[in-house]
Amino acid sequence: MSEMIQAWIDAYGSVFFFLAFGLGPFGVPVPNEVMILAAGGLSRAGLIDPREAYGAIAGGLFFAMHAGYALGRLFGVRLVARIRKPRLRKYADRGRHLLDRFGSVALTIGYFLPVVRYLMPLLAGAGGMRYRTFAPYAYAGALVWTLLYFGIGMIR
């Protein structure tokens, strides 16, 4: 997997990481955990600049987070109701359950659950959560999750 990622990085630079994480909620099938661990490993090996790679990953995730929240605010409950695929619906239901149970803190927790991390901002926006409530918890979750996985990749 690292060789394939390295080839993409050679061709596209850190833009590859930004796009991989930024387009995740829009159906780009990139396994985030594998990708961020690989980025950490490639950084440790000196094949890529760790600051540039991490910045692109975090930037892409922040972009996805804001886009999801904005779509939720704009299209609200109608958009969430259109999630009909049983597998995706399961993740949306899990995210909604987390929000109902833990409130804003669920945004931080949600980053540690695959797929749910991309649905939480959408659900928060659709649920009418204010941006000033949404942003600190969403940023905290994104930063902790990316630092943890990137760091693990660097020590492996």
Image (tube, helix red, strand yellow):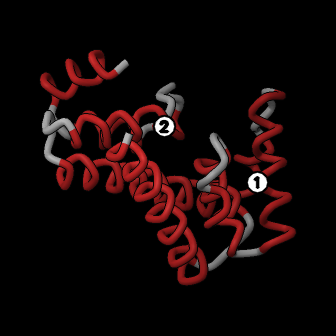
- Regarding mark 1 in the picture, which secondary structure is present there? helix
Camera-side residue of 98 and 39: 39
Task: Kindly identify the amino acid type of the residue bearing the numbered disc 1.
Answer: Gly
Give me the residue at 13% from left, 24% from top. Answer: 10
Give me the residue at 40% from left, 41% from top. Answer: 36
Quadrant in the picture for the N terminus: top left
Give me the residue at 85% from left, 68% from top. Answer: 100
Mark 2 vs mark 1, CA separation in Å: 18 Å
Relative height, residue 66 to residue 27 (above, below): below
Q: Which numbered disc covers residue 95? A: 1
Image location (x, y in percent) of residue 33: 50, 38
Looking at this rendering, what residue extends furthest in the front direction? Answer: 156
Q: Which numbered disc covers residue 32? A: 2
Image location (x, y in percent) of residue 146: 43, 55
Camera-side residue of 83 and 145: 145
Task: Kindly identify the amino acid type of the residue bearing the numbered disc 2.
Answer: Asn
Quadrant of residue 55 in the image?
bottom left
